[in-house]
Amino acid sequence: KVIITVPLGVLQAGVIRFTPSLPRHAEAFNQMGFGGVIKIFAEFKGRFWEDRIATPLKDLAFVFSDAEIPTWWTHPLDDNGVLRGWLGGPGTQRIPADKDVLIGKALGSLRYIFQCNAGAVEQQVKKWHVEHWLLDPFTRGAYAYPTVKTEEALSFISRPVADTIYFAGEAMYRGTAIGTVEAALVSGQQVGHAIAAERH
């Protein structure tokens, strides 16, 4: 028995070869949605955003905006100045993959959100880290999402190939929590139970 739990983006890219080939499975994988995410970690000299605008932001948690990198958040256990930025969906395909370009867009977004003058955010930066999940060869994206053909595709994929090959993971979960860690765990557990039941 083989359980395949790689991200859907890897299956869609066709980098895993099956012999004999599974053309109907390849078609089903591509009927499902798999989105990109760009995540940015920015460490600053201090929590500059707490006094940059008229309304104090001492208890800042999440910021949702219309900036190019629209979502930012802090962590309640952070005493230092770390912000996490997030961009998901089709926008991840429109932004150049160049790290310097992404950091430039992140800086511009923070200046816009916190109403800072040019250079004010840059002067506070200590470190950056950018994670572009579409470019990761081991994921080819970040999370699954349902399309109008997902249910049909999953109905086919959920049946084992020759009682030997099983597919599991967050994209293979048939429920409302697709794209989550919980979905991945439930999917794996269901496949494990199915294999165990066959042995009795």
Image: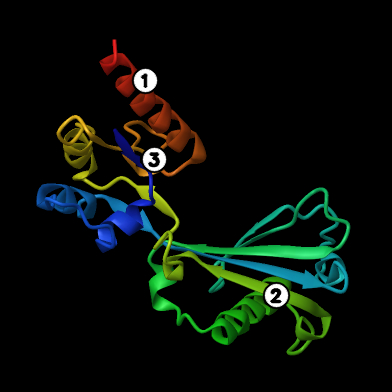
Tell which of 29 and 6 is nearer to you.
6
Left or right placement of residue 65 versus residue 150 in this view: right
Residue at image point 21% right, 45% down: 148
Instruction: Specify the quadrant of the image occupied by residue 80.
Output: bottom right
Query: Which comes sooner in the sequence, label 2 or label 3?
Result: 2
Identified at 85% across, 66% down, the residue is 47
Q: Is residue 20 above or below residue 125?
A: above
Tell me which amino acid carries mark 3.
Gly
Q: Amino acid at mark 2?
A: Trp
Q: Nearer the viewer, residue 8 or 151?
A: 8
Q: Which tag, 1 or 3, sits closer to the chain's start?
A: 3
Q: Is residue 76 above or below residue 37?
A: above
Secondary structure under tag 1 reads helix
| Residue 128: image tag | 2
Question: Few, some or many C-alpha atoms within 10 Å of disc 1 (few <14, some 14-19, many ≥20)?
Answer: few
Residue 86 image offset from top left, x and y in percent? 57, 63
Horizontally, is 102 left or right of 153 in the view?
right
